[in-house]
Structures are given as C-alpha cells and as structure tokens.
Image (cartoon, rainbow, N blue to C red):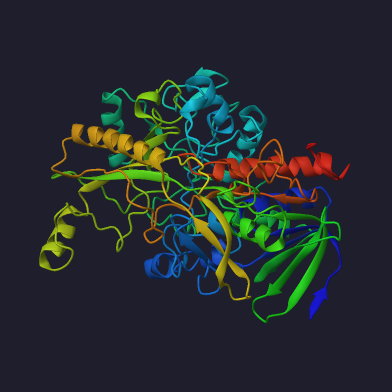
Amino acid sequence: MTTKLREVDVVIVGLGWTGGILAKELTEAGMKVVALERGGMRTSENDYSLPNIRDELRYVVRHDLMQNTARDTLTVRNNPQQEALPMRRLGSFLPGEVVGGSGVHWSGHTWRWTDMEFKIRSNYEERYGKKFIPDDMTIKDWGISYAELEPYYEKFEYTAAVSGKAGNLAGTIQAGGNPFEAPRARDYPLPPLTPILASEMFSDAARNAGYHPFPRPSANASQPYTNPDGSKFGGCQYCGYCQRFGCEANAKGSAHMTVIPIAMRNPNFELRTHAWATRVNKDSDGKRVTGVTYTNVLNGEEFEQPASIVLLCAYVLNNVHLLLLSGIGAPYEPVAQTGVVGKNYCYQTGAGATLFFDGKYFNPFMNAGGSNATIDDFNTNWAFDRAPHDFLGGFNVSGGFNTALPIGYRPVPSGTPQWGTAWKQATAKWYQTAMTINASGSVMANRYNCFDLDPTYRNAFGQPLMRMTFDYKDNEHKMGVHAAGVINDIAKSMNPTKLNSATARTDPWTVVPYQSTHNTGGAIMGSNPRDSVLNKYLQSWDCHNLFVIGANAFPHNSSYNPTGPVGALAYWTADAIKNHYVKNPGPLVQA
C-alpha cells in the first residue's frame, strides 16, 4: 500500500551538488522543499575525519561511498548487435550514493566550458564546412551561451572554494593562467595550490615545447576560506587522499559541507534519506507531473510525495533511468533516430605515460586532487587546426599526481613481472621516482551511443535496468593517437631513465577498469523539442513543472570535468524558477 503525503512546493530527487544548490536557493525564496536521497547521511566530523577516512580497502576497493550494484546497476554493450550484460561491479565510473553525492568523492577539478562546446556544431560548420562532421555524429548546439552562464560559473566557484589563476580577465590575458580560457569577470576566489615537483617538471618541458602550462583549477582550498554563504573551509593539507574519499580537512568543495547544511537549517526544508525514487507521476493528460513515488529502502514502505515542481537532481544515469521508467518523453531509437530520451550518451577518452627517473624523488603520497599543471593548447585553443588530424573536439594534457595511494599506486616499467621478487624490487625502486603525464579527451555524440531500458534484467524493485550502448568511434581514435603523440614528445624531452609510452585507446571500450566518473547526456538540452529533452533552463519540454539538472543535459562531452557547468547550470535553473517560473508557471521557452 502506498501512503500519499501532503503536497509541497518542490520535491528534489538526489541531494548532491545540484540538489543541494536548488534546495538552498528555493528554501531561501520561501518554498517548501522535500529532498529524497537514496543514500545515507554523513558528515565531515563524523565520517570523513581521521582515522576513519584513510581506509583504502573501504573506500577504494569496497566502494563505500558508491552505488550498490547488487541492488541497482545497468547493462552494457558496445553496439546494438551485442547482448548487453549487467555491470556487477563498479569499474569505469563511480556514481555516489550518499548525501552530497559524487561531489563527496570527486577530485575537485573545476572548469568553465565555453562556446567552444555550447555552439559546437555552428563553430565547426562555420570553420570547416558541414561535410567535416560525420553523418553519424549527432552533435548540436546547446541553446545557451557562455555569456549567459558566466555569472553562475563565478557563483559556483566562490561557493566551492576553487583555487586557480585566471588566464583571461575581461578580455585581458593574464600571465600564469590559461590564455585560451573565455573571459571572466573576476579571478578565482583562492590562489593556486602549491605546485609539486612533478607539475613543475611538466610545466618546464611543456613551456620549452612552446605550450602554455598553468595550474589546474580545483575545488581544493589552497588556504582557509569562508565562502559568500558563510561556509568555512580548511586549507588543503596535501594528504594524498582525495579522489574516492571525503575530505578530512574540510578543504574540498562539496555540497555536504556548503549548500546542504544551509538548506537543512531552514524550516522550509526536509531531507529524507534512504529514499529510493521509483517513478515520477504524471497527471491524466501527461502535460504536468504531480510528484514522485519512492520507497524507504530500510523498511520497504512506499510513499507518494505530491509536489507543484519536481526536480531530478540525481546522477546522470539515474536521472535518465527515472525518465525512461516514468514514460516522460519519447525514448530514443538509434536506427530510425526517433525520440529523444536516452540520446547522445557520451563519456571521455584519453592516454597516459609513466616516466621513471633515477635520482628524482616525487613524494607521490603528498598531493591534492588538483596537483597538476595543464596545457590547453589542443583543447580550447581554436588556433589549433583540427583539419589535418581529421577529428572534432580536443584534449588537455597534464602532469602531476592525483591520489597516488599507498596500496593502489604501483608504477613499474613495462616488462616488469606482475608478481614475485622482481616485482617487489621494482615497486620499491620506482614508487618514489616515477611521475605521470595524462591527456583527457572529449567524446562527440554518436547516433549509436545511447541509453534505453533493458528487456531482460531488472533491479531490486523489479524495474528494468537501464541499458548503455557505447564505444569510442573513429573520431576518438584519431584524437587519442594525436594526444599520445603530444604526451610522448613532452615525456621524451624530459629525458626519463625509463618510459612507459602513451598509447591511444583504440580497443573496444570496456566498463571494467576505472577511467572517469564523467558520464554525460541522455536527457539533453536544446532549442526545440524535436532533438532535445530539456530547454535552456533544463525544463522538460513535455511537462513544464519538471526540471532535470545535471550532466545528463550535455549534448556531448568535453575534455574537461563536468562539475563546473553542472554547478553553474544549477544556479541558472534556480534563478529561472525563483524569478520567472513561480510567478507564471508554464514553459519558459516556447516550442
């Protein structure tokens, strides 16, 4: 039996960065908000402090902060001709399942995506002609501009305590920053993190090669900081436990210690943990949503939470899955290219090299999530001509460390035995004296990379699992080859004693090894309902009181981490709801 609860103004599904931002902003505007979070409540003081947090077995091997694949997962295949099989163990990506979401265990890398992404089809057609874009590449303009989003980028950066160095202030290039970034009104709220030896060596080599290295912007507070909302950060201690861990120093920007506590102090807000949303409910004509049905996973009780506005703020995969389960929007079909929900799923590609030096000691256990120097010469630099290389998109290259863990980080030269005395000797010799150079590359949308509901496998509630169809295409293979060449040229110029060279990812993609938790697409934004699920305010074209906030809205994937635009779009959507939608409920953009 389902218990129907009293209606509220807003129900939020998922309480990470997007849900936390919307909860804070809308409760402050006087709206009654209920948040449903599948995971449990955790805090910095009770759960992420020493000695609890430095547990590699618990957080890395056993995925303590991540979704439980025994209860819910997805099926995976490379192409429509294959049978999709369930992902029984987390691997390639790690969605969070806890109050604060994946923002608890991220590294903090925070980028501003620009009109290079937002107007991608227009840019490439204008420069290279329409024939340069392959027929199967379903990239599209996003329907929003960098100028519209710039103030919201700034708001998110100042909320999350981003450390960095501006490269373009109001159109004036700044020494030491990224000269290819779009103009910003203000510098980052905090100076860059202290560089480490590996990042300094990479910067020197990149500069000597004619590139433009800069410190990676990251939500790791380089010094104690109080953000505009009054949330207090400690300075980063370079403890080496960043990715996959909560921050012991309260130095990593996360919703659980910024926007969520502010919302929770407001009497207009209520948080319900262990609340698994199973369906978004629609009214009889299907033009509005009426609320969310969810189950308390601790005791199995089912509830219906009516609401005037529904906000889906869960992880990319969960937002798209819930739309498909709820029958909102037409499911995408890749052969006929009909429908929109599930379309344009994207991931990231990359390449990496390991350099070994006799006589250099890197202390890899001392680092932060943003302890990298980066070059953007092959990414946001529009002067880089893609035509000779025959690919769209770009890649950034960085040198340094990010969570080189005592157990998991074991760099050894190629050809070293994988076990036994020789392996032990090699790992002892090279642990301190190796560094990495990595590239992260964008992935363009393809008609056959998509989501739908699996016809065979089901989750703990008997609902169809979501099926992911994905593989890298020729565009990504060509980009990977170029990125590997750039990495290897820089690496060789540094004269390492030994080098594990970078190679492109040209084999079929596999879900098994970890790559990045940067999944995008499936419920994309755009200028019309024919080829998108959401308008520029992340409002559903089908049901005007439904908003779907997250990287699911991205029509393709950049080489950058997605959290910067995710946070900015959350503030952008909050403003649209507060200042426009509640005053005149209905479509904010006319179809």
Residue 15 figure quarter: bottom right
The residue sitting at 53% across, 24% down in the picture is 125
> Is residue 195 visible in the rendered structure shown here?
no
Q: Is residue 233 left or right of residue 505?
A: right
Q: Residue furthest front?
A: 336
Instruction: Please state, as top left, top right, bottom left or bottom right, where the N terminus lies in the image.
Output: bottom right
Task: Provide residue 99's location: percent of width, then percent of height.
Answer: 61, 62
The residue sitting at 71% across, 37% down in the picture is 528
Task: Provide residue 262's location: percent of width, then percent of height.
Answer: 70, 54
In the image, is residue 527 above or below residue 124? below
In the image, is residue 337 above or below residue 457? above
Q: Is residue 405 left or right of residue 558?
A: left
Q: Nearer the viewer, residue 287 or 16?
A: 287
Residue 478 figure quarter: top left
Q: Nearer the viewer, residue 481 or 547?
A: 481
How many tags in the picture?
A: 0
Q: Is residue 563 left or right of residue 198?
A: right
Q: Residue furthest left?
A: 422
Q: Residue furthest right?
A: 584
Task: Provide residue 484's location: percent of width, then percent of height.
Answer: 29, 38
> Is residue 170 visible in the rendered structure shown here?
yes
Task: Provide residue 486's location: percent of width, then percent of height.
Answer: 29, 33
Instruction: Please state, as top left, top right, bottom left or bottom right, where the C terminus lies in the image.
Output: top right
